[in-house]
Image (tube, rainbow, N blue to C red):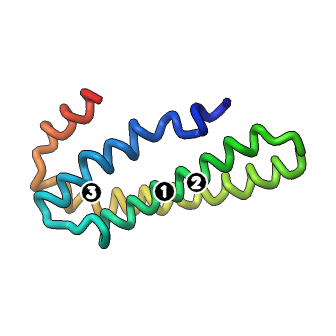
């Protein structure tokens, strides 16, 4: 499959690290709730991204070329739009508040071990 295992082969390396490590630190050290606010918004983005990537992977397996193209374009555009918005949220709104009180070097070292 062109996008990797179910289209999600990349997921544990990016979203998984954020959800399992960074968001946990944000919740523990900054008292951010996990089910509301920035963590919930970013986690929901990750879920939506997984759904869209899975849809693109499924489109690549379809035998009806027209339907496959339609699905691939639809999910691809939605994914591109989501990524732009998600990266903006990370860069401009969330990580700048999360990273200063967290030992960034320790976090980076921990992320590199996975």
Asked whether the residues under the numbered discs 3 and 2 touch, taking CB atoms below 8 Å apart as contact, a structural biologist would say: no
The answer for how far apart the CA atoms under marks 1 and 3 are is: 19 Å
Asked whether the residues under the numbered discs 1 and 3 touch, taking CB atoms below 8 Å apart as contact, a structural biologist would say: no
Q: Is residue 64 left or right of residue 49?
A: right
The answer for how far apart the CA atoms under marks 3 and 2 are is: 24 Å
Say which quadrant the C terminus sits in.
top left
Q: Position of residue 14 (x, y in %)?
A: 39, 41
Quarter of the image where one finds residue 81: bottom right
Identify the residue shown where x is 24% and y is 49%: 22
Label 3 environment density (alpha carbons within 10 Å; few <14, some 14–19, many ≥20): some
Choose the circle earlier in sequence order: 1 or 3. 1
Asked whether the residues under the numbered discs 2 and 1 touch, taking CB atoms below 8 Å apart as contact, a structural biologist would say: yes
Identify the residue shown where x is 66% and y is 57%: 77
Q: Is residue 80 left or right of residue 99?
A: right
Instruction: Name the residue beneath numbered marker 3.
Output: 95
Element type where label 3 sits in the image: helix
Instruction: Name the residue beneath numbered marker 1.
Output: 47
Choose the circle earlier in sequence order: 3 or 2. 2
């Amino acid at each position: 499959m062109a996008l990797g295992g179910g289209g999600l082969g990349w997921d544990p390396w990016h979203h998984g690290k954020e959800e399992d490590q960074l968001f946990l630190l944000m919740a523990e050290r900054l008292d951010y709730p996990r089910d509301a606010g920035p963590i919930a918004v970013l986690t929901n983005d990750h879920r939506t991204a997984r759904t869209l990537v899975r849809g693109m992977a499924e489109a690549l397996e379809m035998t009806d070329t027209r339907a496959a193209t339609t699905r691939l374009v639809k999910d691809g555009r939605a994914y591109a739009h989501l990524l732009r918005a998600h990266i903006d949220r990370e860069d401009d709104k969330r990580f700048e508040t999360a990273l200063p009180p967290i030992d960034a070097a320790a976090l980076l070292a921990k992320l590199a071990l996975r």
